[in-house]
Amino acid sequence: MPSTGTPTTGPTTRHGTGRALVGRIGEPRVSVEMLPLLAEADLLDSPATWGSAPTSAGVFRLEPVRPARHLDLIAHWMNDPAVAAYWELAGPTAVTAAHLRTRLDADGSVIPCLGLLDGTPMSYWEIYRADLDPLSRYYPARPHDTGIHLLIGDGTNRGKGLGTALLRAVADLIFDNRPRCTRVLAEPDIRNTPSVSAFLGSGFRCSTEVDLPDKRAALMIRERALRNLL
């Protein structure tokens, strides 16, 4: 992550079968066979119905993206160099539009959202079924594992610990509204130190280091069973 401290976790690329290198940070990594995607599928409950969460910075809620209303704002954020370094979606609005279309056409297994703080859009999120995503080939997935990608759009909101507060709030919203989900996951680029730190500060642990085709990622996990302890 750039020195601005942007808590961004770029999207996971669709991966093929083969082998992956995994291991804890600082320990030798080993090659393991990638498993096929889990077959079970269901729709993610709409984050629009999840309600709001109080944070130290204000009241936060998620609103599903509507390209007709939100495309220009999200494209503007994607062209911020601090964001583009990890999302790699800089360019004309059509680049962001194409990315959103892949999410909106994902049969409900991925939901792109705006994050609103006291009613003001200030972040972009992707809530996804990690157990149905190609990421599940790189770790021992459990049914209903739920993943998150995020970026904070306004540079004035970065580097203040806001990402930590919002990550905790979104994980809690997922647990409260997806009772079968026992874990919330993310896979930030291992070089993105401020992002990894934000996850650690919001109750996630770094489970392992995973070599994905487009990055080496820290697999961050927050457990439902530990939500009131961490």
Image (cartoon, rainbow, N blue to C red):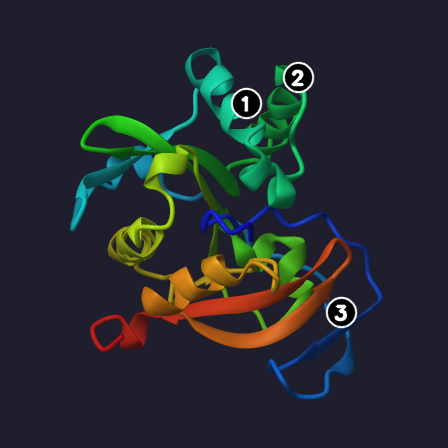
Observer-nearest of 127 and 70: 70
For disc 3, the marked residue is 34
Q: Amino acid at mark 3?
A: Met
Q: Nearer the viewer, mark 2 or mark 3?
A: 2
Q: Secondary structure at mark 3?
A: loop
Q: CA distance from mark 2 to mark 1?
A: 8 Å
For disc 1, the marked residue is 75
Observer-nearest of 7 and 10: 7
For disc 2, the marked residue is 92
In the image, taking residue 95 as reference, residue 107 lies left or right, namely: left
Q: Secondary structure at mark 1?
A: helix
Q: Is residue 111 above or below residue 32?
A: above
Residue 115 lies, in percent from the top left, at: 34, 35
Does residue 193 show up? Answer: yes
Of the image marks 2 and 3, the number of the one nearer the N terminus? 3
Q: CA distance from mark 2 to mark 3?
A: 35 Å
Observer-nearest of 18 and 27: 27
Q: Is residue 182 above or below residue 158?
A: below
Q: Nearer the viewer, mark 3 or mark 1?
A: 1
Of the image marks 2 and 1, the number of the one nearer the N terminus? 1
Q: Amino acid at mark 2?
A: Pro
Q: Dot 1, how many residues are within 10 Å of its Cα: few (below 14), some (14-19), or many (20+)?
A: many
Q: Amino acid at mark 1?
A: Ala
Q: To which quarter of the image does residue 127 belong?
A: top left
In the image, taking residue 79 as reference, residue 229 lies left or right, namely: left
Q: CA distance from mark 3 to mark 1?
A: 33 Å
The residue positioned 32% from the left and 64% from the top of the image is 202
